[in-house]
Image (cartoon, helix red, strand yellow):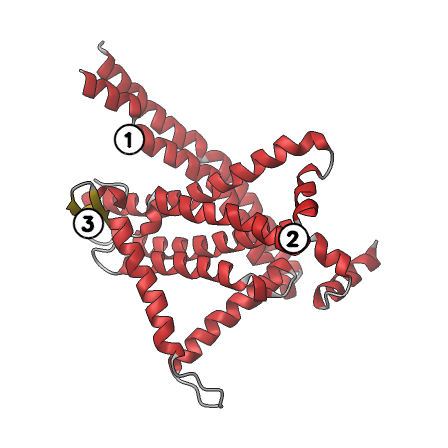
Amino acid sequence: MTISPDAIILWRWGWLHINATMAFTWVVMFLLAGGSWLITRRLSQGPVISRWQNLLEVVVTGIRDQIREVSRQEPGRYLPFVGTLFLFVAMANLLTVVPGYRAPTGSLSTTTALALCVLIAVPVYGIAAEGVVAYLRKYTRPTVLMLPFNIIGELSRTIALAVRLYGNIMSGTVIVAILVGLAPLLFPIVMRLLGLLTGMIQAYIIAVLAMVYIASASKIERRDAGGAGSAESQDTPEEGHG
Amino acid sequence: MDSVSLIGMVSVITAGLTIAIGSVGPALGEARAVAQALAAMAQQPDEAGTISRTLFVGLAMIESTAIYCFVVAMILIFANPFWDRVTAGG
């Protein structure tokens, strides 16, 4: 039983080899990019839109609404990163309905790469929002004594992000593989369905967590700016209680 | 008892104990979180969207502790470094 799709070598030439993780990652990337390119070639602004444009509009609008609700900020800056993260993981997990496909998110190298992207994106968005000094000062926020703990927290949540996604997808694969040996008729299908649900939830979770981390790194700017519209107006009734 | 069988025995027993003990805490925590969320949703149906979104994120955070235990158990059984070293050396 192969746990990780890293162990499945599809093609080898000298020291160069292509394993299933890389191949299926490219399949997912090609499907996402190619599909989006095909659909967005002919967009219409009129009342009649094609069904594929409708699909993309639903997806993009849904992601924008979720980002707006989670971060209480305008989603425009965060949409490319967080939306891509969600769409890639969701697509990678949903394609497990295709026979012979191994989800690349079931490999620790893919999830580590995604978590490293989040680790880098947090300071990038934070510095872009409020400058280098203000961002770095945030690490010493309560006192300077908290500096090592903040750094450890930054690293440990990255590891948690990687292992969480990997563990969920890998556990689904392993459970299905064990059940195929034990009770091959019905139970693997049920667990596969559960795996699809878990995959979608995990895609949502990793996107929301990335958004929460990024938003918490660039939050001060919103308070200082004062007039961030909807977020401020939502905060005011809560202040009336106190 | 030679070291190969000792390492195999300890690995299997530890893997079972890891997943058994490690799933108790998250199970209790998730049950508590879901119960609280259902009570909150019953009291405030208007806030069901916000509550369920927070619930999902929280459940994933709680569940990840069980997932860590599962990963450790899988490493002990399928990718045990000590087992590999002993079997390769002997």
Q: Position of residue A227 (x, y in %)?
A: 76, 65
Instruction: Read off the residue under disc 2.
Output: A218
Q: Are marks 3 and 2 in contact (CB under 8 Å)?
A: no
Type of the residue with mark 3:
Pro
Chain hosting mark 2 = A
In the rendered image, residue A12, in percent from the top left (x then y), is placed at 16, 46
Which circle marks residue A184 in the picture?
Answer: 3
- Where A213 falls versus A67 (above or below)? above
Residue B51, located in which quarter of the rendered image? bottom right
Image coordinates of residue B79 in percent, x first then y, are: 28, 31
Mark positioned earlier in the residue sequence (3 or 2): 3
Residue in the picture at 23% in, 16% down:
B5
Question: Which amino acid type is shown beneath numbered disc 1?
Answer: Ala
- Percent position of residue A93, x then y: 35, 56
Between the residue at mark 3 and the residue at mark 2, the CA separation in whole angstroms equals 50 Å
Give the residue at mark 1: B79
